[in-house]
Image (cartoon, rainbow, N blue to C red):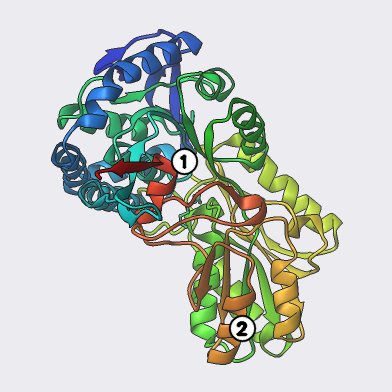
Amino acid sequence: MKQYLSLIDGQWADFGNFQPDINPANTDEVIAEFSYGDASAVDQAVAAAKRAAPGWAAASPQVRHDVLAAVGNALGANAEEYGRTLAREEGKTLPEAIGEVGRASQVFKFFAGEALRLGGQLHPSVRPDIDIEVTREPVGIVGLITPWNFPIAIPAWKTAPALAFGNCVVLKPADLTPACAQIIARLLNENGCPPGVFNLVYGRGSVVGEALVNHPDVGAISFTGSVEVGNRLAEICGRLRKKLQLEMGGKNPMVVMDDADMDVAVGACLNGAFFSTGQRCTASSRLIVQSGIHDAFVEKLTAAMTALKVGDPLDAATQIGPVVDEKQLTSNLKYIDLAKQEAAEVIGGERLNLATPGFFQAPALFLGTTNDMRINREEIFGPTASVIKVGDLEQAITVANDTEFGLSSGICTTSLKSAREYRRRAQAGMLMVNLPTAGVDYHVPFGGRKGSSFGPREQGSFAAEFYTIVKTSYVFSG
Ligand code: UN1
């Protein structure tokens, strides 16, 4: 059995306490074992980061560029192999997994360039003979806490900007997907990232995550995960006055207007709701459909959904992989029962017994639902979507915005006027016209409003807002 360790100060650190990484498509298969650390491992990692921080902050942007570009290139060159690892430990299909590694590669390359592009501003003072310079400096040590559903892309899109802008990192990845974090750690370590600049600590969120968030030398925390944990981090970071960036849940609406192109609408909803087993915070979970197209749309989407092949992610015919673990599957199945209790018509959603012992579930559609039902208020995070029938655009906008979340919001229409109106009034961080609510580019801001996100945006040049602090310098030369 392969055993993997945390990375602290450029060295692999063995804390014993090895935990298995299990394939959700075949629970007999243990991919590897990972040594879990505790609060003292976090202390060691932060101490290493603290020693490395002055040197890395002063390093030439060329040095930072070269490390990030090398990691980006290595990810791209080995996308097939790393994609297999990702598919085996997380369960998304091989093409989705390879695509995600490709995205991580692009993210590293993009931020390699951003390291060179970081600039400032020069202002004349209102007083004579004084110039004012506004510059950005690294925060110092940042703690990154990442989820299992994009196990290589999300660590990449937090780590790459952190390092590009001169910070040192301690990464605590999700327990369910340690192998992907190991890839990033190994590539950084082998491609010129100095010891202590990037540290990886495996361990429970309640132990390692908690220690990281509470550590006085960690200046900023970026977290993607549940609302419950995010709210807790907000309290701690507020009290300790740490910078905080939260990406949490979604209950993303996708409006389908009578004038929509049927194939575009069915394709967008199928992808947005069910691909990656619905395990995306950007998933389209509320399909808000105008009455004139409703019946024909439901018929076509149902046919397309029931034709989706659920199976082993490594099998080329598979379109939907397993649910990530037993706990998530149990929760998904509870929501199937709840949908029935709430008098929705449920199509699909049952647990599937396939050739290997895994957490397979048929995708599900809930019909005849209203927006006040719990299935339309709470994030399910599984391969399920509800259909809510509405009369017109006005009602569609009201229903779409009637949620505590605000990550992504979509509309399928051929009317420029309707698309424009929806774009203007949707209460969401990301807006999609004739596209799935999920599936974003890597070089532009990512984030939401309301209960979905907190703090500055991730990705693109906007990432500098979180990973740097501003200094305003006054220089008198009279
Ligand atoms: C995407 O939809 O392309 O956890 C990315 C998530 C998001 C990432 C979604 N943070 O699902």
* Residue situated in front as seen by the camera: 26 or 211: 211
Residue at screen point 16% across, 28% down = 190
* As drawn, 396 above or below 140: below
- First in sequence, mark 2 or 1: give its number: 1
Q: Report x, y in % for residue 217.
A: 45, 20
Question: Residue at coordinates 48% horizontally, 20% vertically from top-left?
Answer: 203
Residue placed under numbered mark 2 in the picture: 421
Q: How many neighbours does mark 2 have within 10 angstroms: few (below 14), some (14-19), or many (20 or more)?
A: some
Q: In which quarter of the image is the N terminus?
A: top left
Q: Within 8 Å: ligand 1 and the Cβ of disc 2?
A: no
In the rendered structure, the answer to whether residue 3 lies left or right of residue 407 reads: left
Query: Which is more foreground, mark 2 or mark 1?
Result: 2
Query: In the image, residue 393 lies at what x, y percent?
Result: 70, 84
Amino acid carrying label 1: it is Ala
Q: Mark 1 points at which residue?
A: 25
Horizontal and vertical percent position of residue 65: 18, 43
Q: Are marks 2 and 1 in contact (CB under 8 Å)?
A: no
Residue 6 seen anywhere in this rendered image of the structure: no
